[in-house]
Image (spheres, helix red, strand yellow):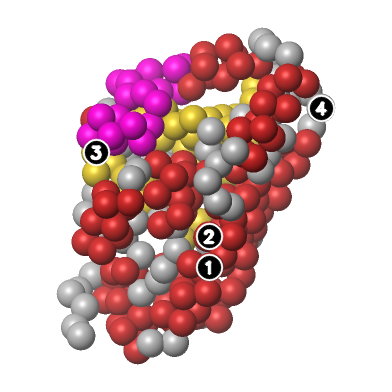
């Protein structure tokens, strides 16, 4: 399926909004992830764009990948992996700052976007989680660990539990928590403040800040993705996806 799963709007002040919109839960399929990666990269290359805001419509920010698509055709995991990798890299390595404005559930690929972003603004109802173990997959811990510390990352990854916006703020994982109806305006206000500065200086600053990070985010994520393919060869992986699609408990 190649239906449009996001749209872009560029404002006169150089702020670009890329909006994920695939009802009901914004779980993107293989085509969606690959398309989103290309859109983020191309938008950042446009000379008039100074800042990118990624937000979403519907019930939550992003529920990750389309598990039903993978359950129907597990060979698509290669394309999904490529799309995830390219999307998170397009955010992290973009020429301009990227702000993630999130609400509701932020799962899987949603964590990848947030962990790759420069700034995360969350609505009060936002909850963050990485249920990869419960979906028979791996990946995303590198991005989760860019937000949270090692201990909290491992707890969330092993248990599949969610963490709320208030606690994420307390732990320094996100920049700000705002009421749901103020989310978009707050993100656009912050973006406008950055967009008003010298675009040349901000682009230099983005590259410089990426360069002083501890380790290479893309290399770490690629390492994880190798284990996703290993996980998919296990019968337990197929059982987790089948259980999820059929809304039953997995049996091991």
Above or below 245: residue 237? below
Secondary structure found at label 4: loop
User: How many neighbours does mark 3 have within 10 angstroms: few (below 14), some (14-19), or many (20 or more)?
Assistant: some
For the point 73% across and 19% down, the residue is 201
> Pointer 4 and pointer 3: residues touching (CB < 8 Å)?
no
Please, what secondary structure does the residue beneath circle 1 have? Answer: helix
- Of the pair 81 and 18, the residue shown nearer to us: 81
- Residue at the spot of label 3: 164
Q: Which residues are magenta?
A: 167-186
Question: The N terminus appears in which quarter of the rendering?
Answer: bottom right
Taking the spot 30% from the left edge, 21% from the top edge, the residue there is: 179
Q: Which residue appears at 41% of the width and 80% of the height?
A: 231
Residue holding disc 1 = 223
Q: Nearer the viewer, mark 3 or mark 2?
A: 2
Helix, strand or loop at label 3? It is strand
Position of 181 compared to 37: left or right?
A: left
The residue that appears at 24% across and 56% down in the rendered structure is: 155
Residue 234 magenta-drawn?
A: no
């Amino acid at each position: 399926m190649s239906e449009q799963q996001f749209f872009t709007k560029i404002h006169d002040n150089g702020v670009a909004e890329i909006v994920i919109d695939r009802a009901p839960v914004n779980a993107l399929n293989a085509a969606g992830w690959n398309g989103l990666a290309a859109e983020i990269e191309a938008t950042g290359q446009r000379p008039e764009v100074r800042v990118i805001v990624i937000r979403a419509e519907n019930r939550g920010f992003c529920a990750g990948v389309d598990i039903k698509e993978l359950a129907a055709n597990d060979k698509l995991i290669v394309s999904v992996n490529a799309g995830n990798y390219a999307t998170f890299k397009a955010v992290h390595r973009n020429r301009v700052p990227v702000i993630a404005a999130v609400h509701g559930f932020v799962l899987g690929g949603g964590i990848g976007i947030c962990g790759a972003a420069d700034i995360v603004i969350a609505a009060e109802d936002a909850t963050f989680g990485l249920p990869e173990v419960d979906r028979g997959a791996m990946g995303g811990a590198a991005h989760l660990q860019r937000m949270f510390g090692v201990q909290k990352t491992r707890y969330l990854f092993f248990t599949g539990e969610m963490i709320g916006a208030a606690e994420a703020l307390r732990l320094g994982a996100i920049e700000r928590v705002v009421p749901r109806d103020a989310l978009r305006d707050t993100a656009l206000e912050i973006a406008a403040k950055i967009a008003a500065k010298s675009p040349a200086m901000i682009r230099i600053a983005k590259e410089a800040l990426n360069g002083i990070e501890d380790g290479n985010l893309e290399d770490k994520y690629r390492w994880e993705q190798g284990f996703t393919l290993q996980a998919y060869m296990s019968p337990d992986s197929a059982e987790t996806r089948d259980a999820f699609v059929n809304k039953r408990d997995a049996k091991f």
